[in-house]
Image: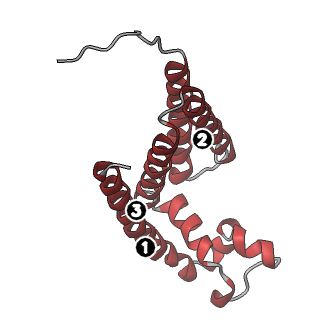
Amino acid sequence: MTFNKFLQMIIAALFLMVFTFCTWYEGSEILDRPWEWGYSTHFTQVNADQAMDTDDISNFDYLVYAAKFKPLFPFLMVLAASYLIILTGYILFKRSIKKMALFLLGLGILFLLSSGFVSNSPTVGGNIFQSFFLIGGMIAILSAALYYFRIPTGFHTEI
């Protein structure tokens, strides 16, 4: 791995941590809105039927609440995570055209499935994430096809 790629990974990881903290902080607003607990505490409801007290709410539910109602930092968090995943895939599979194309295809399918998962959300954050995942999935699948079907030239020009 070159220094350039390593530096990109470090910077992207730092951005991911900052955006995750900002998202978690903004999502902690759910503690002040008990009427929203039934709709935004999906992780808490896995362990119990419903959150009854602020201590019952999972920290992951902070992220869900922020993504639904304050989507700027969650969007930037998902963007930084996506960049890290794509960069890692490029570093691992850059020598194999088929593996890289399969990696991009899998990422595109994952994005499209995520788009379908958030498609029925009535919130502005849900609409933003649906659009992002839909467009990102189509771009990843198109990139996989272009990467797989690129025509090797067979000669290299050296100066």
Q: Residue furthest right?
A: 49
Task: Categorize mark 1 by other alpha carbons within 10 Å: few (<14), some (14-19), many (20+).
Answer: some
SS for dot 2: helix
Q: Amino acid at mark 2?
A: Phe
Query: Measured from the top left, where is residue 133 in percent x and y?
Result: 55, 41
Q: Which mark, by number, is residue 21?
A: 1
Mark earlier in primary sequence (3, 2): 3
Q: Which mark, by number, is residue 13?
A: 3
Q: Nearer the viewer, mark 3 or mark 1?
A: 3
Residue corresponding to mark 2: 111
Task: Categorize mark 2 by other alpha carbons within 10 Å: few (<14), some (14-19), many (20+).
Answer: many
* Residue 10 horizontal side relative to residue 61, left or right: left
* Residue 14 horizontal side relative to residue 68, left or right: left
> Whole-Å distance between the Cαs marked 3 and 1?
12 Å
Mark earlier in primary sequence (3, 1): 3
Determine the residue positioned at 51% across, 78% down. Answer: 28
Mark earlier in primary sequence (1, 2): 1
Query: Measured from the top left, where is residue 109 in percent x and y?
Result: 65, 36
- Type of colouring: secondary structure
In the depicted view, which residue is nearer to us: 124 or 128?
128
> Whole-Å distance between the Cαs marked 3 and 2?
20 Å
Task: Categorize mark 3 by other alpha carbons within 10 Å: few (<14), some (14-19), many (20+).
Answer: some
Determine the residue positioned at 25% across, 14% down. Answer: 157
Q: Is 93 placed above or below 142 here? A: below
